[in-house]
Amino acid sequence: MPVLGYIGVVVALAVGLLAFLIGRYGVFPTWEFAVFAVLAVGQLLAGDVVVERRVVLSFSSIVLLAGQAILGPAGAGLLGLGMGAFEGRSVPLRARVFNAAEVAIFSGLGGLAFLVAGGTADPAQLQDTSDIVFRLALPLLLADIVQFLANVLLLAGVVRVAQGVPVSVQVRTLVGSTGAAYIGYGIIAFLLVVLWRPAELGPVAVLLVLGPLLVAQWAYRQHAEELTGQGRALQVLVAAVEAKAPHLTGHSTRVAELSGHMAQHLGLRPQMVSDTRVAGMLHDLGQTSLPTALVRSGDPAADSFSTYPARGADLLRGLSFLAGALPAIEGHHTALDADDHPALPARIVGVADAYDLLTEVGTPDGLVLRRDEAIEILRGRPHVDAELLQALEASLARRIGEEVSR
Amino acid sequence: MTSVFRLPSRPVATTVLGLGLVGLGLGLAGSGSRLGTLIATHAPALVVFVGVIAVGDLFRLRMPSGRETAPLASASALAVAFVGTINGEAVFDIDPGLVALVVTVALALAAAVHRAQHRSPGVPQLAARLLGVGLAAVLAREVGPEGATLWDDQALEGYARGLVAVGLVGVALVAIVVELVLVSAIRAERQRSPWTAAVRDELTEAAPLTLAVVVTGPMVALMAPVLGLVALPAALVPLVMAYAAVGQFARNRATNRQLIATLSVLTEEGGYTRRLHAERVSGLAVRVGRVLGLGDRELRDIEYAALLHDLGQISLRDPIPDGATVLAAPADQRDIAAEGARIIRRAETLDVVAAYVEAQTTPYRLVRELGEPVPIGSRIIKCANAFDDLTQGSSDPARVTAALERIHLGLGYEYDPDVVDALSRVVEHSSVGRLAEEPLLAR
């Protein structure tokens, strides 16, 4: 159980660090600590704002950072311990233990960095502008960086131990996705501390700083809702195809699923996997602009029929969020036989489409092939290689697995 | 003979503009003699404030409904109204009149840039903002029990300043509400929609951003004694985060609208409907809805439903002539509408839109005689669709008149009289029910 071992090490570190901080700097049970505790509870109830599995606004980072200046390292460490422990709903116990230790460590280290850099939140020591810069702004920036790096390293460590993802990859992903936001958190925490202590507003400072953050939170939630709406609206496009061509009912959804899984199996980047999946879903859209009789006759040999991939891509041309899916939509129909070298996503959708047509949709006279027959036919197409077929077989196996587990 | 005393065509907008000018004049008269000294004393602060307000107005935010707001400029202008002690600078002790002057100069600069880039600056709206900020300056700097104003109280020691902060936020809130109410009055007048509906939409849509705007001015005033002039840009950081988030959400909403519009193109590409028919019907339907005082949420559903009202034609074997459903047999119309609604229902979030599409063929007679509940959205789309089918998108007056006459023949039987009335007003003048700004002064 390497994961348990890792958690044990982190917990030991946290206990050691907290004991040192409390012994060295002490905790004074002030009313300010109580205010921060209330803030922490509020933060836990509201939660950080997550859009597409990425934290876009982290209240907890702001609260902890301001706490490092106002409460000192020991207070900030304890605050982190509590916030980590109660983070999220239905979290398994050992994850809670790890979170508590992890947040306590990076919050305590941040507080320590603030003090070591000469930081103070005492109004008496913050008389002129240079004090504000050198004794508050810069130390807070340093604490921000330390908190961020400690957080990233501890998280990357647990992902390395649990899932085998290399630390460097994980660090790069985390820094790229949340690094810039941390600068914003640093500035907001700075404003909170300035208003609280030197400007002498006390806890009212929280009310002033919180307003814009709540607005941002509201807007990001709306944004997430719009993204869901987008997915639903794509379903309407699929429904339009199926109204036009009833024999294709369910085809788009199956091709989308197969294309996505194949792209994943072939190791494409997440954005390309998503683009390929969407291309699979919308590959037949162009058929809606063909005469109904032609589409329903299901005669793929007709000349005008083969214009549908280009028509589909044209229909979606103006939509920036679908730009990545267009080449595969446009190329899927010819990708398996073309003379030039078609791109991988187009070939993926081409294979998924052809396989589904052979095995599920069937020919106009009702001929439906078995899996091995269809794969034999696909093997004969010029741009279908062993790798692609292996991805197809793996995705089909996954489909069966998912059906069984359902 | 033309009358010399012609009533202005938009009395409300003109009044707001006039009030703004009068306020500015009074302010200048009050402190005009000291103007030179004041400018010399506060030069760095004035430059920063004017610069930030002007730049803030260039970063306007287009809300999902199409309204424009300038949260950064509003918040910075309020900061000027409140600020007193500034670390490293002279105490910013000026009259409300001078506050108004500073804000005016900044907004005029921004308006000039907007003009140069061929955008309408919306002068009456700027005047409304000036009036709101002027009011805030008066409330903060001149009003208070026994002469102790909020502005004086900023110098209080200790946590009593927390109370001052709350007071300043209250004043800022009053200023913003005054600005929003004036802006919605101007808007209601121009698009000839009910004033109450305009105020309701303006306040509800602006509510979240307002929360962020009203705290920023007080934040600047209370941090300036510590941070100096840096307080203004620093305090704008949280607001900018809120601004960015709202902007992203608004852009996303726009993308979704575009996606729905793509669906309306499907029937055009297939040769079932005339080019841009759905876009025109949707434009008309939204304007009619706005004149009838419908809310933003309803208007959006109407817009989507109007874009998709012919979607059901997609599976027809043979296109109907010109795609004009108004000329098709009633039973065919109903089938098309039902098929369209069935397709739209695939997106669970668009149920209301589907209902509007489904009921768009029901004659108004059934509402009146049998009490059949036909949603207002469907009644509007029925009417707008008939108008566009009959004019075929032409704005030729003879065709428009003929189309309106034909629709009037079906009044009360086929069409809802209130909707027809609103349609006539919308068709009469291009600004009725439209959100986009038109310059008041450039005529």
Image: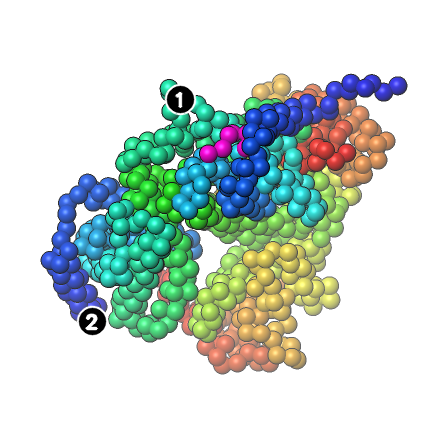
Image point (56%, 26%), residue name: B30
Distance in Å between CA atoms under marks 1 and 2: 71 Å
Tag 1, which secondary structure? helix
Q: Relative to residue B133, is residue B307 depicted above or below?
A: below
- What's under tag 2, amino acid-wise? Pro
As drawn, the label of residue B147 is 1
Picture disc at residue B19: none
Q: Is residue A190 left or right of residue B422?
A: left
Mark 2 falls within which chain? A
Looking at the picture, tell me which residue is in the foreground, A261 or B68.
B68
Q: Residue tagged by mark 2? A: A2
On the image, which quarter does residue B164 sit in?
Answer: top left
Which residue is depicted at the point 82% across and 28% down? B401
Q: In x, y percent, where is residue B339?
A: 61, 43
The answer to whether marks 1 and 2 mark residues whose Cβ atoms lie closer than 8 Å is no
The reply to the same-chain question for discs 1 and 2 is no
B443 left or right of A114 in image: right
Mark 1, chain letter?
B
Q: Position of residue A276 (x, y in %)?
A: 52, 65
Q: Quadrant of the N terminus of chain B?
A: top right
Disc 2 is placed on an element classified as helix
> Compared to B137, does A327 lie above or below?
below
Residue B416 is one of the magenta-drawn residues: no
The amino acid type found where label 1 is placed reads Gly
Residue in the picture at 53% in, 49% down: B252
Query: Which portion, as a residue range, is magenta?
Result: B93-98
Query: Relative to residue A228, is residue B205 depicted above or below?
Result: above
